[in-house]
Image: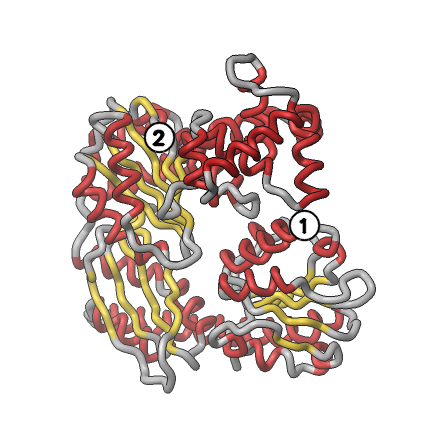
Amino acid sequence: MSIVLGEALEYESLKTAEPRLLNEVAGALSRPVRWVHSSEVLDIAPLLRGGELLLSGGQALAAETTERQEGYVRELAARGIAALALETGPTLPEVPHAMVEAAEAAGLPVIELRRVVPFVGVMQEINSLLVSESVEQLQRGDQASHAMAAELAHGGGLDQLLAVLAERTGASARLVSPSGLTLGAAAGAAVTGAGGTVTTVDVPVRGVLAARLELEVPDGGDGGLARVAGERSVDILGLALLQRMPPGLRELAGIELMRAINTGSQSWQLQQLGPASGFPVDGPVAAVVIRSAGAGHLRQAVDLMLRECVPHSASYANNAELIALASLGDGAVARIALMEALTSLEVPAGSAVAVGPLGHGIEEAPWSLAEARRTLDLSAGRGLLEAAPSGGVVDAEAFAVERLAEEHLDAATREGFVQRQLGAVVEHDQLRRSELLRTLTVWLDTGCNTAQAARELHLERQSMHHRLQRIFELCGGDPRGTGRLAALHLATRLARL
């Protein structure tokens, strides 16, 4: 038995709360629920695995700004949770409309719980059923693995092994090499309905990623069983790969290089793995991070784009993140070309892409990767992505100030500095619903180019001059030609945090 959202809402413990779906998300009630969890923590998204029904009393949300509320639901949607259920009452009389709209745009169902119910009771009732289902899935996954082992013992190849797995799970199975080559495939049992979900499982050989198993579960299929059976079949598929085609040393070294960069290994390891994989150890490099629900499926397109754009590259997909390393012969010029190429790359809605700063030599690749990740982490829910160039590709170099401040200045210090430099501007915006702070930020980011700032803000030049005049009055005069310009610019950047 598989529990979907619509069924979960009918269980007595949750039905008593009179749940009501607030937005229109395609297939919302058919979403599988992997677990029921409750939390008032707004930064809970990184701790979730996807498929959760998240219950919240809304106390923390009620005190937040509209921007933070919208960022909260976007973060949850990016983690792939089943739905967010919010309890309305004295603290949160109604779910904010702007937050509901943001959730709908991100594909996250939002449910209003119109009566108070004990969340512990809801979790106990539904999670106990899910645990029972998990035990059954483990048993069936083991049965599938044993059947595959018997097939291998009788000389079955990859296609035959995948056929056994497809028959046992009802999912279409495909085994893909790290370079995107299909090594074997089998169709699953037909299930009524269109679309479906894809479960991906890494298949290592001797500790190195040799292939990736993709199980496509059609609507109405059991995704949990497919995931468990796929994980149970990893060793069998690894043995079959060794018999059929041992991975080449160069390919294995390339995979191991990216894994070493991903884990921040010591430079001597990178110096050894680079030449073995054909990646130069000297010269400028930059890391790329793509966070997307379809990260694994993007790898082939990303590798093709990199081969056309840079002389040497390597990539590695892990869960919902695809990382890549590019060798940039011309340094900054080649990095700009890489940014432009990534902008034209087609990625699923809700994806986030960042290019790390320029590193000098392969030993700085882990640093470039870490800085790209930190930039994406900072951007989540804080409006930094809106400052990225068109196409949604974030340049980590453009946010060096934010990363430095976030790492070395505590929140109170940052807030105090912003208040001293821009307190009057912020207060003016709050009282009169103006956009002076945004105007000042764009003007400073364009190098005090009034005409360009007016174009970016879609303002008439005269209106732009009037705004600047008011800003100068609030800030103590025109900062150009004074030492205050740098302080004001820093304050606008810190205000984003």
Mark seen at residue 65: 1
Lower sequence index among marks 2 and 1? 1
> Which residue type carries mark 1?
Thr
Residue at position x 53%, y 58% in the image: 49
Identify the residue position indicated by label 2 in the image.
365
The residue under label 2 is which amino acid type? Ala
The CA distance from mark 2 to mark 1 is 37 Å
Percent x, y for residue 207? 34, 46
Q: Is residue 317 left or right of residue 468?
A: left
> Is residue 387 positioned above or below 34 on the image?
above
Q: Is residue 378 visible?
A: yes
Count of numbered tags: 2
**Quarter of the image where one finds residue 339:** top left
Mark 2 element type: helix
Quadrant, the C terminus: top right
Q: Residue at 52% across / 82% down in the picture?
A: 1
The residue lying toward the viewer, choosing from 326 and 385, is 385
Judged from the image, the secondary structure of the residue bearing numbered disc 1 is loop
Residue at x-position 68% and y-position 52%: 41
**Residue 447, above or below 205:** above
Q: Which residue is drawn at the image coordinates 70% and 77% (left, top)?
A: 14
Decide: marks 2, 1 in contact (CB < 8 A)? no
Outermost residue on the front side: it is 462
